[in-house]
Image: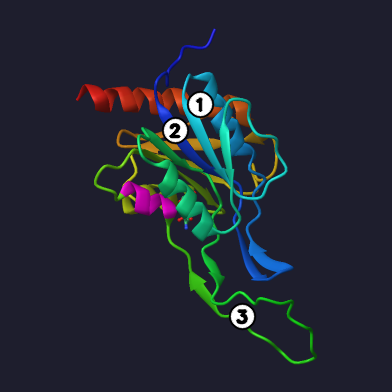
């Protein structure tokens, strides 16, 4: 028996990497399996939520009951998120969004030559920070994958992006695998969870965020 902790709530999630085209056959991407975001989408559905999953390119089936909006680039992901946002109670940014995109994307395949080449990059918008800054912002949850100093960077990102909840993990630990070790950061401090399968961690995250959401509604 799973309590319906998110019954009547609408949840929008981003998951997977983004793909930033250089030309029709090449691009820049991040390494992200999408497993954590998809596990979280499943956990939200199990908790009774309506779920929209804005997903970059991944090799995972649509979680039963979710509406998946497939996207490639960060700009497409941002448009899909903003379009899905009306009526949303919770926004969870799990996607590994590319920080930069090529300043120009070539219409035709770039031909190789023997000379050095460089690629001009331009910063992508921070989708999560943008959503969290909206006057009518939903309850926003972020993720931070760090290779060191997790506490400092995770709490810094939570404050900068003004998030009530952020999930931190050390990379090398969970990337691409089925298990992960995570720490939850909120206004009350840090809450480390024991190493567990991503499906189980997703359940813990949903329970934690539902409690914060209920506390916010009651205050
Ligand atoms: O700053 P950093 O990229 O590590 O922040 C990670 C969090 O912000 C994740 O929740 C990620 O999905 C979100 N993010 C975003 N748009 C970006 C960069 C990160 O939504 N352009």
* Structural distance between the alpha carbons of marks 2 and 3: 37 Å
Residue 130 vs 88, above or below: the answer is below
Expressed as whole percent of the image width and height from the top left, the position of residue 147 reads 57, 54
Which mark is first along the chain, 3 or 2? 2
**Residue contact between numbered discs 1 and 2, judged by CB atoms under 8 Å:** yes
How dense is the environment of label 3, judged by Cα within 10 Å: few (below 14), some, or many (20 and up)?
Answer: few
* Structural distance between the alpha carbons of marks 1 and 2: 8 Å
Is the distance from the Cβ of mark 3 to the nearest ligand 1 atom less than 8 Å? no
Q: Find the magenta span and give its range.
A: 127-132
Q: Residue at x 60, y 31 (%)?
A: 39
Quarter of the image holding residue 102?
bottom right
Expressed as whole percent of the image width and height from the top left, the position of residue 139 reads 34, 36
Task: Pick the residue in front: 216 or 69.
Answer: 69
Q: Which residue is mark 3?
A: 119
Q: Which residue is mark 2?
A: 11
Image-based side of 214 in relation to 179, left or right: left
Q: If the image is split into quadrants, where does the C terminus sit? A: top left
Expressed as whole percent of the image width and height from the top left, the position of residue 28 reads 64, 66
Q: Secondary structure at mark 3?
A: loop
Which mark is first along the chain, 3 or 1? 1
Q: Which residue is mark 1?
A: 44
């Amino acid at each position: 028996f799973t309590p319906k902790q998110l019954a009547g709530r609408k949840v929008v999630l981003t998951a997977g990497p983004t793909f930033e085209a250089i030309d029709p056959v090449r691009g820049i991407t991040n390494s992200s399996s999408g497993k954590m975001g998809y596990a979280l989408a499943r956990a939200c559905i199990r908790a009774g939520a309506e779920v929209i999953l804005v997903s970059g390119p991944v090799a995972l089936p649509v979680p039963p009951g979710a509406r998946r909006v497939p996207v490639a680039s960060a700009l497409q992901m941002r448009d899909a998120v903003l379009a899905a946002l009306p009526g949303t109670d919770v926004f969870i940014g799990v996607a590994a969004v590319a920080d930069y995109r090529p300043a120009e994307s070539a219409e035709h395949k770039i031909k190789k030559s023997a000379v050095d080449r460089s690629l001009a990059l331009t910063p992508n918008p921070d989708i999560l920070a943008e959503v969290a800054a909206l006057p009518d912002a939903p309850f926003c949850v972020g993720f931070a994958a760090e290779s060191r100093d997790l506490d400092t960077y995770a709490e810094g990102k939570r404050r900068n992006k003004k998030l009530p909840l952020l999930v931190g993990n050390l990379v090398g630990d969970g990337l691409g695998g089925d298990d992960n070790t995570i720490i939850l950061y909120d206004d009350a401090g840090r809450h480390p969870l024991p190493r567990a399968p991503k499906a189980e961690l997703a359940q813990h995250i949903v329970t934690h965020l539902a409690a914060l959401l209920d506390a916010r509604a009651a205050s």
